[in-house]
Amino acid sequence: MKSLLIRDLRLATRAGGGFGLALAFFLIVCTLVPFGVGPEGGQLARIAPGILWVGALLACLLSLDRIFALDFEDGSLDLLATAPLPLEGAVAVKALAHWLTTGLPLVLFAPLLGVLLHLPGPAYPWLLASLLLGTPALSMLGAFGAAVTVGLRRGGLLLSLLVLPLYVPTLIFGAEAVRRGASGADPVTPLVFLAAITLAVLALVPFASAAALRVNLR
Amino acid sequence: MSIWEYANPVKFMRTSGAALPFVVAGAALCTVVGLVWGFLTPLDYKQGSTVKIIFLHVPAALMAINIWLMMLVASLIWLIRRHHVSALAAKAAAPVGAVMTLIALMTGAIWGQPMWGTWWEWDPRLTSFLVLFLFYLGYMALWGAVEDADSAADLTGVLCLVGSVFAILSRYAVNFWNQGLHQGASLSLAPGERMSAVYRYPLYLTMLGFFLLFLALLLIRTRTEIRRRRLAALLARENRR
C-alpha cells in the first residue's frame, strides 16, 4: 500500500504528471471571476466562499481521469487487480494520492485566493477547515467516476457529467460553512455534516469504485 | 408461479405482449379522462385557472421519483441475480423518467411564474429535481457510452446505487441550505390540509393514468430492447458463419 502511494505520488509530481495543473486552473478561475462580476469589494466578498468552493471543485475535476487512465492503458491496473492488496484498498490509495497532489495544494492555496476575492477575515479558518474536510470526499467520489469511465473513449466529458451531481451535497455544506464563517454565524453545523459526508464516502465508495473497476477490467 | 419466471425473456415477451394493449388502453383512458375532468374543475378562489396545471405537475413529479426507485430496484435485481430483462427494464425506464422530471420542472416553472412571480427559484424541491434530472442524464449517457452490453448494465447499476444515495442526500442537503416556496406534501391525508375533493379525485385519476402510461412505455421500450438484443445476437451468428 505504501509503495503504491509512493509510486503514484512520484508519477504525479514528475514532469508530465499534471501536478500543478489543477492549482493553475484554480488560480485562473478565481482571477476570472472579478473580471466577470466587476471589482467591487463588497460584492466579491459576498460571493467569495461560493467561488472558492466551486473553483476548488472544478480544479479537482480536471485531473480525475488521470487517476486510473494511465494505469489502465499500460496494464498496471490489471496487475493491481491481481495483487494481494484488495482492489478496494488500491482504489483508496489512488484516491489518497490524488488528494495529496490536488486536494491538499488546493486547500493550502485557497486562503491566498481568498485575499484576492476580499474574503472577510473571520472566514479563513473555516475556509481551510471546510476544504480540508471536503476535498477528500471530492477525490474519492472522483475516483469512483474515473473507475466507471476508465475504459471508455470520450470518457472525460462523461466523467464530469457523472461526478458533478455527486458533488452537490459536499459543495452545499462546504460553501455554507465558509459563508457562515464570513458572516459571523456559527459554522459548526454544516462542518459536522460535511465531515459526516466525507467519512461515509471514504468508508463506502471504495467498494463501489472497485466493483466498477472489476467490470471494466473484465 | 413466481415473479422470477419473467426473468425469462420469452416468457416476459409473451406476457407483456398480451398485457400491453390493456395497459395502453387503461393509460389512455385514465390520462384523457383525468385531464379533461381536471380541465373542467372550477377555478380556485386564489389561484384561478393556474391550479389546473396540478393535473400534469403532480403526477409527473410523482413518476419522476418513482421511476428512479424502480430503476434502483431493477439494478439491484440485475446486480444480485443477473436477470437481463431487469437490466434492460432499468435502461428502458431512464428516458421516461428523465422526461417526467423535465415535465415536472417545466410545468412547475409555468405554474410558478404567475403564483410566485418567478420562473425559477432555488428552492429545495426545485433544486433536488434539477439534481435528479442531472442524475438521469448521467445514467443515460453512461448506457450510451459503454459498448459491451453486460458491462454497461453493471456500471449503470453501480452508478444507480451510488446516485440514489446522493440524490437523497442532495434532497435533504438543499433543505438545510434554503427554505423554499414550494409547499410540503401535496397529498396530505390530514383533513384540514387536504385539498378539496373537486381537485383530489381527478388528480388521483391522472396519477393512475401517468402510472399506467409509464408502465406502457416501459413495456414497449423493454420489448424493443429485448428485440434489439436478439437482433444483435442473430447478426453476430450470421457474421460468424
Image (cartoon, rainbow, N blue to C red):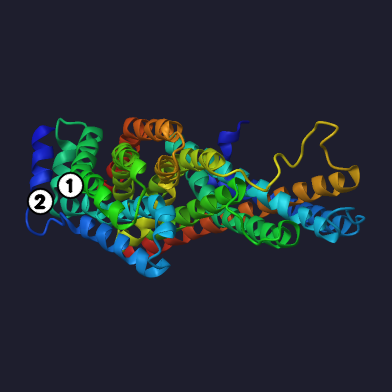
The amino acid type, in three-letter code, at marker 2 is Thr
Q: Quadrant of residue B96?
A: bottom right
Dot 2 crowding, Cα within 10 Å, few <14, some 14–19, many 20+? few
State left or right for residue A175 relative to residue B40. Answer: left
Give the answer, above or below, for where A43 lies relative to A140: below
Residue drawn at (39%, 45%), measured in percent from left and top? B154
The reply, left or right, for residue B100 in relation to residue A204 is right
Q: Nearer the viewer, residue B34 or B113?
A: B113
Q: Is residue A152 in sight in this rendering?
A: yes
Q: Position of residue B124 (x, y in %)?
A: 59, 46
User: Mark on residue A101?
Assistant: 1
Secondary element type, mark 1: helix
Do circles 2 and 1 both sit on a common chain?
yes
Residue at 81 percent across and 59 percent down: it is B50
Q: Nearer the viewer, residue B82 or B93?
A: B93
Q: Which residue is mark 2?
A: A13
* Quadrant in the picture for the C terminus of chain B: bottom left
The picture places residue B219, in percent across and down from the top left corner, at: 63, 52
Q: Above or below — where is A190 with respect to B138?
A: above
Q: Is residue A137 left or right of residue B233?
A: left
Task: Depth check: give the residue in front, B75 or B187.
Answer: B187
